[in-house]
């Protein structure tokens, strides 16, 4: 499985590609950051993020795209930029028919370090160890993108089995009919 991880952001959008399967050694195929100038108009910055992600998709041909799920912060402006960059990543993947998975920061941290409360240094350290790198990827956005890809590779088999079980249950279970007047 080849996964492009995207840590969305308007100034720095982390991207990383990891290949492998759960239970086997993983291999990093690429890591980097799509940067945009802070003084540029938001629409122009989103175009630059889109071009950068498209280049990564062209070069690495992932089978899946894992994007960090945007969560609420105190700074609404930061959340908006992150959400907009996240939407661009999902749009780029959807155009190509690639499945998109959203993972929360705590899910990613728990998958990679064992603790959903791990700090950036712990995530970077574990990414370095899991991918057998000489040093943690810099900046932290790049390491976070690799962590997203690793999380998806490890979680996808269980998630797929769960979705199949739910679908099978729905096919074999008769719909519940409520008596008239109780709807």
Image: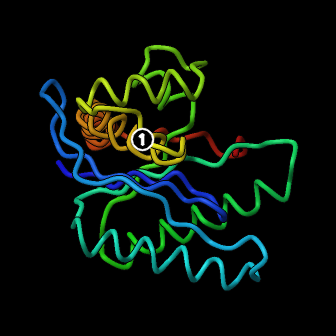
In the rendered image, residue 155, in percent from the top left (x then y), is placed at 32, 32
In the rendered image, residue 74, in percent from the top left (x then y), is placed at 87, 42
Q: Quadrant of residue 160?
A: top left
In the rendered image, residue 159, in percent from the top left (x then y), is placed at 32, 35
Above or below for 53 versus 6: below
Q: Quadrant of residue 154?
A: top left
Residue drawn at x 46%, y 48% is: 142
In the image, farthest residue toward the left = 24
Which residue is more in the foreground, 26 or 86?
26
Q: How is the image coloured?
A: rainbow
In the rendered image, residue 43, in percent from the top left (x then y), is placed at 70, 83
Q: Crowding near pointer 1: few (<14 within 10 Å), some, many (20+)? A: many
Residue matched to label 1: 137
In the image, farthest residue toward the front = 134
Residue drawn at x 48%, y 27% is: 123
Above or below for 110 versus 60: above
Secondary element under disc 1, as helix, strand or loop, is loop
Left or right? Give the position of 77 relative to 66: right
Residue drawn at x 38%, y 69% is: 93
């Amino acid at each position: 499985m080849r996964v492009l991880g995207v840590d969305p952001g308007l100034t720095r959008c982390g991207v990383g590609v990891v290949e492998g399967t759960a239970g086997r050694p993983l291999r990093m195929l690429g890591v980097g950051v799509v940067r945009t100038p802070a003084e540029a108009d938001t629409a122009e910055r989103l175009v630059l993020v889109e071009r950068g992600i498209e280049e990564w998709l062209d070069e690495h041909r992932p089978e899946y795209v894992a994007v960090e799920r945007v969560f609420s912060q105190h700074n609404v402006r930061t959340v908006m930029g992150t959400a907009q960059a996240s939407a661009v990543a999902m749009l780029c993947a959807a155009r190509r028919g690639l499945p998109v998975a959203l993972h929360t920061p705590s899910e990613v941290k728990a998958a990679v370090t064992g603790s959903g409360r791990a700090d950036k240094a712990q995530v970077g350290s574990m990414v370095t160890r899991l991918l057998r790198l000489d040093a943690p990827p810099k900046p932290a956005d790049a390491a976070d993108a690799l962590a997203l890809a690793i999380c998806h590779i490890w979680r996808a088999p269980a998630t797929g089995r769960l979705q199949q079980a739910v679908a099978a249950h729905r096919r074999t279970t008769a719909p519940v009919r409520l008596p008239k007047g109780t709807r």
